[in-house]
Amino acid sequence: MKPTRTFRWIALGLLGLYVLIPVAASLQFSLEAGYKGRLSLTAYSQALAEAGLGTSLLTSVKVAAGAAAITLALLVPTVIFVNLRFPRWRAVLDAVSLLPLGVPAVVIVLGVLGAYRSLPSIITGTPVILALVYVILAMPYSYRAIDASVRAIDMHTLVDAGRSMGAGWGKLFSRVLLPSLRSGILAAAFLTVALSLGEYAIASIMGFNTFPVWLVGVEGNNPYVAVALSISALAFTWILLVALALAGSGRRRRSRGFGAGLVGPEGEDEITPSLAPEEEAVA
Amino acid sequence: MITTTMATAPPPTSAGHGPGTHTGGGVAVELENCRRTFGKVHALDGFSISIAPGELVALLGPSGCGKTTALRAVAGLERLDEGRVLVGGDDITDVPPHRRNLGMVFQAYSLFPNMNALENVGFALEVRRAPVAQRHKRAGELLELVGLSALAERYPHELSGGQQQRVALARALCAEPRLLLLDEPLSALDAKVRAQLRDEIRRIQLEVGITTLFVTHDQEEALSMADRVGVMRAGHLEQLGPPSEVYSNPVTNFVAEFVGSVSRLPGEVVAPNSVDVMGSRLSIPASTGGDLPIGSQVDVLVRPESIRIRPQADGTAVVARAAFLGAVVRVVAALPNGVEVTSTLPASEGHTLPAGTRAGIELLGDVLFVVERQGSE
C-alpha cells in the first residue's frame, strides 16, 4: 500500500505544480505591475476603476444566473422522469447531452441565429439568447452532475415510499426528490455558472459585452490590470467551488445525540458501512 | 389453481390495541382473480386471496413467483390487467396509490435521506397537513413503540440497518393506515438482527391489530410470524393455511419441497392409501389427493425429523456428509441406489456419524407427500 500512496502524493504534487506555477507567476506579474521586486496592489485598484467593469460583470452574472436557472428547470425534471418512467431513454439522453462538445462555437452561433430569427427581439437582441446558448453548452456537464446524483439514490423506492404515505408529485418533488438531489443540482448550477462566466468566443461573435469579452479589450491597454482581473476571476471561481462543496457536505450534518454509545439489551446492532461501530440506545 | 386448506379466513392468533398507537382496527382485504403480465411473463395469473381483519398473512415463494407484484398491486404501485382489490369492502383497484391510506415497508433504502427519524416518521401526517406539534407527538409515540425514541434526531445514514427498518415501520403506521404491507423488510439485514426484528414486527402488529400482508422468500420468517402462509408459484397460490398446516400437510409437490426440506425416496403403492418404502409400510397422507393405483411406482417425500439415521456396521447406507449447524448436525446418507436422505441429530450426537460411516435408515412413519415417479406436479 505504501508505494501506491507515495506515488499518489508525487502525482498530485506534480499536478499541483503544473497548475499553480502559472497562477503564481501571473499573481506575481499583477502584483509587480512592471516594477520588478516591488509588490503592490496598484493593478488591482486600477482594475476597479476601469470603465465598463461593472456593466460587463453584471451582464455576465445575469447571463450565468439565467443559464443556471433554465438548466435546472429543464434538466432536473427531465432526468428524474426519464429515470423513473422511461429508463430506456437514458442512453438517448446521454448521447444528446454530448452533442454540444462536437460543435464549434461559430457553427453554434450561426445555428442559433438562424433557428431563433423569428423570436421577439427581447430574446434575440439581448443577452437572454446568450443564456439559452450557454444552457446547451453546459449540458454535457450539468446533465451528468444531475444524472450522477439521481443514480446515487434509490429513487424508485423513495417515490414508492412517498406515494404509499399519501404524497402527490408536488410534495414528492419539494420534500423528497429535490433535497435528495441537492449536491447534483448544486454541481450542475455551478458548472453552468462557471462555464457562462468564462465563455468568450460565442459572446464575442454575437457582440455581447460580457466580462471575458471586456477583459480581452482591457488587455490591449493595460496587461497588468488584465492579469489582475483574471486572477480575481479565478479566485471567485475557487470561492464558488468551496461554497458548493460546503453546501453539499452540509447534508451529512451530525445530530446532537450521535455517538452517545448507550448499550441496548441486544448489544451491538449491525451497522451501515459509513459509520464506525456503535451500540443501540436503550428504548 | 388455488388450493386452500381453510374454507374461511380464521381470526388472528391474538389482536389488541396499544394505548395511543392505532385506533383504526383491522380491515378485511380481498384480491379477486388478479392478473398482471409483463411481456410474456404472467406475474399474477388468477391470483385470489382473502385476509381477515387483524390477520398477518405471509406470501412465500421463490423469486419471480409474483408475491411482490401482488403486494404492489394492493399498494397501487402496480396496475392490474384484470381483477379487483378490495380493502374494507371498498374496491380500490383504480384508486391511485397516494389515496389508498395504506402503510408500506420496503426492503431497504426507503427512508428519506434529507429527514431525520422523527421527520421521516411524521411524513404521512405532514402530507395530510397536520400541525407540527401533532406530527411530532404522534411520531414520538411510534418511535417509542419501536424502541428508538432516543434516536429521533438521527438521519438515516446515522442509523444501522435494523434501526432504519424500525423507523420505516413506525413511519408506515403513522397515519393509522387501514392495512400494512411489508415487502421483504428483513432480507437486507444480517441473521441476528433479522431474528430480533421479526419478533418485534409481530409484537407491534399484534399490539396495533392492523391487517398485514407480508412478502418474503424466507420460510422461517413466514412460518414463525404469520397467522396464515400463502405459498405462491408462477403467479398463483399453491396453498394457503396456518404455518403448521402448510408445513405438515402440503397439498402439492411444490409446497412439500419448497417449505422446509425433504428427502425423496422411491416407493410402491401396495394398498389404497399405503405405500412401501424401503421395506416399511407407510400411510399415504389424505392431502396428497388422487387415487394412486396399486403397484404405482412413486416418490415419497419425507421430512428430516421423520428419518432416523444411526450408525450400523452392516447398514446399507453410507454417510455422505455431516454439517454442523450449531444446535443440530444435518446428516446426509446415501442409499445403495444413489438416493440421498437427510436427517438432523442433536449436536452432541453428531460425532457418531462422520462422513463414510455405515448407517441404518429408519422411517418414523410420517410421509409428507407422494407423487407418481414419472412426473412431478
Image (cartoon, coloured by chain):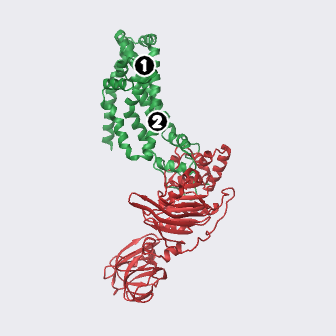
Which residue is identified by label 2? A185
Chain of the residue on which disc 2 is drawn: A
Q: Earlier in the sequence, mark 1 or mark 2?
A: 1
Q: Nearer the viewer, mark 1 or mark 2?
A: 1
Chain of the residue on which disc 1 is drawn: A
Residue nearer the viewer, A122 or A101: A122
Report if residue B156 is visible in the image. Answer: yes
Report if residue B169 is visible in the image. Answer: no
Residue under the image location 63 percent in, 50 percent down: B139
Q: In the figure, residue B357 lies in which quadrant?
A: bottom left
Assess whether mark 2 and mark 1 are in contact (beta carbons under 8 angstroms): no
Residue under the image location 55 percent in, 51 percent down: B96
Which secondary structure lies at badge 2? Answer: helix
Residue nearer the viewer, A161 or B1: B1
Which secondary structure lies at badge 1? Answer: loop
Residue nearer the viewer, A115 or B185: A115
The image shows residue A69, relative to residue B125, as above or below, that is above
Q: Amino acid at mark 1?
A: Gly
Q: Which mark is residue A125?
A: 1
